[in-house]
Image: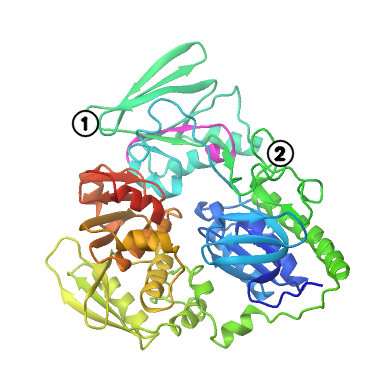
């Protein structure tokens, strides 16, 4: 009989914290199993960028973030544990399975794969070149960049239909280009789009090419039996949003588990994969309908199937029953902190930045801080500077390890909240604006890396960071609603914390529109190296190091 008493053993591990993974975690934890949920980005998954959900039974209307926040709380209530980490490898042969991450290797009897899917690129000429300069994939993240412009939406499914209507908030006119003779989404949504005055629909139409100079200037389309070209007005540009389906996030199991030709995970009616003890749920699986309601159903079925498998394994292996303590008890005793910081999101409510719920999640983490942090807040006379000052004041009141200092600034980059050590030495990172929304996570984790134990990092990467011998200035342009921005922000700031030759400045685009014009930014996240080289999209430490190593 093999005993597993360490903190790295879990009865079951759920990979992915979207609706499917959260649903599985709720069912498994409620069944008294020790459950770990591993998410590489944002708790809630891609649905968090959806501004309005109106077809989830029992919920009249809610944002994706609101809905999944409640799911996470429910999973935690029953004892599920959460960490933010990228799963690098899974070993799922045999009874005992391993999940490898930069934070450690975890052992388990069962796995639920709820890794989801990512937006698909079409591959037309110009798509790669103009990503971030006119071509985008997230209406919530990038829609505002196209205010007053014409926008073309490519796709005929649910996402294309929903997002085309959402984009009318910003666009002069939205053109929905559907390759098929009709929509491929529900008729009710299709009828809503067709009736919308801000959306012009073109069926049997696909893009041939997009091009221009620094930004998009033209696009060529094939519509039924003719070719036609759209040209932007002189000196202006336009947008193309691609919603052409999704690609399954299958890198962990491709070749090891049965998949379809399209790479989707094959499961049976009980969500079981081709390997014993491994189950799939949500958009990563082969299925006809990809909606929140089907994702949570998959998660519930996978969890209940896994419950039966775990019971069989306990009996077969003669494992003793374990009464795992709830993570809630650990939180009440303030014994842990890192896991909670990574799923916090700050919202301004009733004049305060930190609600009681956020404080409850944040305080255990702050108690782990071993070093002092000084927040130097550079302000001018703007309203946002006042908010930054209040943010620093409220944060300092939560921990005796955090203090703040206000200084007047005549520079155009105010407000700036700069992270310094207790002597006032700049530690290489500043946030220009107020780090709310998704960027509160980044800010908190950077403080943890600076003053606490810090997140684990591979020794090879750490040595490569320390070996950087030339100064570099990194500017990261973000939107507080963007779920892809935090990865880049945390990676850049970690590099700056480890090597003081690197200076990182994070800018909330909403308060620094001049940067948008200077660098022709039409998508976030955007990273600028030494005010010259411009890069778009999510990036980790490895990718940033490769970019820093490129010749200017």
Instruction: Tell me what residue is drawn at x 29 percent, y 49 percent.
Output: 549
Task: Quickly name the residue at label 2.
Answer: 288
Q: Is residue 331 left or right of residue 31?
A: left
* Image: 227 above or below 551: above
Note whether 321 is above or below 470 in the view shown: below
Which of the 4 image quarters holds residue 63? Answer: bottom right
Numbered badge on residue 235: 1
Q: Secondary structure at mark 1?
A: loop
Residue 149 covered by magenta stretch:
yes
Query: Is 440 situated above or below 269?
Result: below
In this rendering, position of residue 157 left or right of residue 276: left
Magenta residues span: 148-161
The residue furthest top is: 225
Within 10 Å of the Cα at label 2, are there few (<14), some (14-19), or many (20+) other Cα atoms? few
| Left or right: 397, with 101 as reference point | left
What secondary structure is found at the residue carrying circle 2? loop
């Amino acid at each position: 009989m093999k005993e597993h008493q360490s903190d790295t053993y879990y009865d079951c591990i759920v990979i992915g914290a979207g609706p499917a993974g959260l649903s599985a975690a709720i069912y498994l934890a409620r069944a008294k199993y020790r459950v770990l949920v591993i998410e590489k980005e944002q708790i809630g998954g891609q649905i968090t960028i959806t501004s309005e959900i109106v077809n989830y039974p029992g919920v009249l209307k809610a944002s994706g973030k609101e809905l999944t926040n409640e799911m996470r709380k429910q999973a935690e209530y029953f004892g599920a544990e959460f960490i933010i980490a990228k799963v690098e490898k899974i070993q799922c042969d045999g009874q005992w399975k391993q999940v490898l991450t930069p934070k450690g290797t975890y052992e388990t009897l069962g796995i639920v794969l709820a890794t989801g899917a990512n937006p698909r690129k079409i591959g037309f000429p110009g798509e790669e070149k103009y990503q971030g300069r006119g071509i985008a994939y997230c209406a919530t993240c990038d829609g505002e960049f196209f205010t007053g412009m014409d926008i073309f939406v490519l796709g005929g499914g649910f996402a294309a239909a929903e997002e085309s209507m959402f984009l009318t908030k910003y666009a002069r006119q939205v053109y929905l280009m559907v390759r098929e003779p009709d929509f491929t989404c529900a008729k009710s949504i299709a009828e809503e789009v067709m009736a919308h005055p801000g959306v012009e629909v073109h069926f049997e139409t696909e893009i041939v090419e997009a091009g221009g100079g620094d930004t998009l200037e033209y696009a060529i389309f094939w519509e039924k039996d003719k070719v036609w070209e759209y040209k932007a007005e002189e000196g202006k540009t336009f947008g193309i949003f691609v919603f052409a389906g999704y690609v399954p996030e299958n890198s962990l199991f491709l070749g090891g588990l049965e998949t379809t030709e399209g790479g989707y995970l094959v499961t049976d009616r009980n969500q079981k994969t081709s390997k014993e003890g491994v189950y799939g749920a949500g958009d990563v699986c082969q299925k006809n309908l990809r909606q929140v309601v089907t994702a949570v159903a998959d998660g519930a079925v996978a969890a209940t199937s896994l419950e039966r498998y775990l019971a069989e394994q306990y009996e077969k292996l003669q494992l003793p029953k374990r009464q795992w303590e709830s993570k809630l008890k650990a939180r009440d005793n303030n014994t842990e902190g890192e896991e909670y910081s990574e799923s916090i999101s700050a919202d301004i409510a009733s004049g305060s930045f930190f609600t009681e719920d956020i404080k409850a999640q944040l305080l255990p983490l702050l108690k782990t801080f071993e070093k002092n942090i000084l927040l130097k807040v550079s302000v001018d006379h703007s309203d946002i500077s006042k908010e930054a000052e209040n943010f620093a004041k409220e944060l300092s009141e939560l921990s005796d390890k955090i203090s703040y200092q206000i200084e007047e600034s005549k520079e155009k980059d105010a407000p700036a909240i700069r992270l310094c050590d207790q002597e006032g030495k700049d530690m290489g990172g500043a946030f220009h604006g107020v780090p709310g929304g998704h960027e509160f996570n980044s800010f908190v984790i950077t403080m943890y890396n600076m003053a606490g134990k810090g997140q684990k990092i591979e020794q090879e990467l750490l040595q490569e960071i320390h070996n950087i011998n030339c100064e570099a200035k990194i500017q990261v342009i973000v939107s507080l609603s963007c779920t892809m921005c935090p990865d880049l922000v945390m990676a850049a700031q970690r590099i700056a914390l480890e090597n003081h030759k690197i200076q990182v400045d994070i800018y909330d685009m909403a308060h620094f529109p001049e940067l948008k014009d200077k660098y022709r930014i039409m998508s976030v996240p955007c990273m600028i190296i030494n005010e010259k080289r411009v890069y778009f999209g999510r990036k980790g430490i490895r990718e940033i190091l490769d970019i820093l190593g490129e010749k200017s």
